[in-house]
Structure formats: C-alpha cells, structure tokens
Image (cartoon, rainbow, N blue to C red):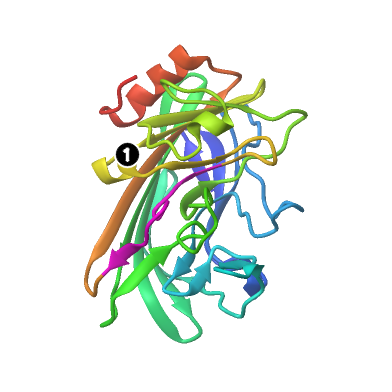
Amino acid sequence: MLYCGDRPVARYEHRPRLARRESPRPYLHPVRTLGGTVVTELRPADHVHHLGVSMAVPDVSGTNFWGGRTFVRGRGPTELDNHGHQRHLGWPRRGRDGFTEEIAWQRGGRRLLTERRTVAVRAVDGTCWALDFTTELTNTGDEELSVGSPATNGRPGAGYGGFFWRPPIGARPPEVFTAGAEGEEAVHGSPAPWLAMATDAWTLVFAGATDATRRDPWFVRAAEYPGVGSALAWDRRLPLPPGETVTRRVVTGVADGRLDRAAAARIAARLTGEVTA
C-alpha cells in the first residue's frame, strides 16, 4: 500500500496472477483520491487486459506486453501466441510513499528488457496528490529491439503503448482537455505538456516530466471508455539498440472534484516544477 501522509491512496500488485493473454505485469489498483474515490479500473469487461495504472507495450520486436489481440498488417486484430510478461526481480528501495523496482520483460525464458521503475507519492494540496511514475527500459541483450504499436503496424490513430491509466466508466464520458484544446478528437495524438481528464467526482492531470516524455503524443479515449496513455511509438517504431535505455516520466495529479482548465494548469505547473500552462 502507498500512502500520502497518513492516507492510503494506492495499492501496488507486483506479482499478479493473470492469464497469459493479459500479458501479466505489475499494476496500481485501486488508486484513490484523498477523499477516497477510486480512479482506476481493473480488468473491465470491455478490455480485460486493462490493469489500473501500468506500463504496457503492445509490440516489442513482435512480443505483446499489452495483452489481448495483436494488430497484424493486412489481417487486423489477431489472436497470437506472442504474449510476454513482466517479472518482478527485486526492490532496491521500498517505503510507504514509494519504491524502486527491478523488472524483467520476458517472453518464455528469454529476457528482452530490464526495467528500473520508480514510483513516488506526494501531496500537492488539500484535495490533490501526485503519483510520480518513472520507467527506465534497457535492452540488456545483444540484438537490437524496437518498440511498435498497432499504428506502426497499420492501424491509424492507435499509437498506444507506454504508461497507461484506465479510469472507471461513469454515467457519462469524462471531459478531456489540454491548455489549448478540448475534446477527445482534439487532444488525441497531441504532444501537449499536460492533459486533464475530469468528471464531477474526480480529475486527473497528466504531465510529462522530461523533454522526451513531453514530445510523446497522448493516447486518449473518452467516449468508448476512459483511458489516457503516453505513447512511445505513435506513428513510427522506436529503435532500442543493445545497451541503450529509454526513460520516460509521467507525474499525475489525482484530485477530488471537477477542475476547470485554469485549476488544472496550476496543478500541472506544480507537478514537475517545469510545466507551464
């Protein structure tokens, strides 16, 4: 359990028992506001491989670390026996307000990547706290790897893969907006410094905290289901030579109630100390 002060705000499952087609991986769920409202969903009926907050990639040199079907050029979504899993290796640091974890990304007995994941919790104000999520993915093998997505494999607009947050479905779709755009169609695929998803009960403010993360487009769903991710391979594959590391950091403000654009911008500016409205 992770705490913001004396309040429990998130549970981290580091060794989940999941079916192979769900690409087993560590995840955060439930994640709660300071007021106790749950802002994550686990294994929803519409996408059983959506796991709260996780790091999930649909294509690492042909291995599916996202779960579900694989988009194959010329065939569409296809059931393949290509699922990988993320295996917990150890805790370099572990505390009430965060941890650092070593994780092996592997398929069968072959390790493709080694990840160093750092998660930290801190207060922002009386109604908002921040989840700071950093991932360092290293190609520890001797062959070049590449990160892809359904979009790089032929499905336009489906460039998902990376940090992904699945909120629960509400009575109506949430609002989504950035500093300069509003609505799912306008913000989907945008490399905005920050993005907010808001309902009457809660608001999530996502901010990229490194130059590379801020260049990554946001993958956004609102009408069909709520979901926000930072995309590693939006429309072109991301090469990862042996020994190289890809680092990304997303800091998310978790607030009670609905924030407007001005309030979300103020939260975003506080999340990293670098983001401006």
Expressed as whole percent of the image width and height from the top left, the position of residue 120 reads 39, 43
Residue at 61% over, 19% down: 257
Would you call the spot at circle 1 few (<14 residues within 10 Å), some (14-19), or many (20 or more)?
Answer: many
Indicate whether residue 234 is drawn in magenta. yes
User: Disc 1 on helix, strand or loop?
Assistant: helix
Q: Note whether 49 is above or below 108 in the view shown.
A: above
Residue at 55% over, 38% down: 9
Q: Which of 152 and 4 is in front in this view?
A: 152
Residue lying farthest left? Answer: 243
Expressed as whole percent of the image width and height from the top left, the position of residue 210 reads 27, 41
Q: Quadrant of residue 162?
A: bottom left
Which residue was labeled with disc 1? 214
Q: Note whether 176 is above or below 224 in the view shown.
A: above
Q: In which quarter of the image is residue 115?
A: bottom left
Q: Note whether 215 is above or below 172 in the view shown.
A: below
Q: Nearer the viewer, residue 107 or 234?
A: 234
Expressed as whole percent of the image width and height from the top left, the position of residue 39 reads 62, 37
- As shown in the figure, which amino acid type bears the numbered disc 1? Arg
Q: Nearer the viewer, residue 274 or 88?
A: 274
Indicate whether residue 67 is drawn in magenta. no
Q: Would residue 141 appear left or right of 131 to someone viewing this image? A: left
Q: Note whether 21 is above or below 253 in the view shown.
A: below
Q: What span is in magenta?
A: 228-240
Expressed as whole percent of the image width and height from the top left, the position of residue 170 reads 73, 32
Residue at 52% over, 20% down: 127
Tally of numbered tags: 1
Q: Nearer the viewer, residue 42 or 58?
A: 58
Residue at 41% over, 25% down: 124
Whether residue 3 appears in this view of the structure is: yes
Q: Would residue 19 appear left or right of 154 to someone viewing this image? A: right
Residue lying farthest bottom? Answer: 109
- The quarter in which the C terminus is drawn is top left
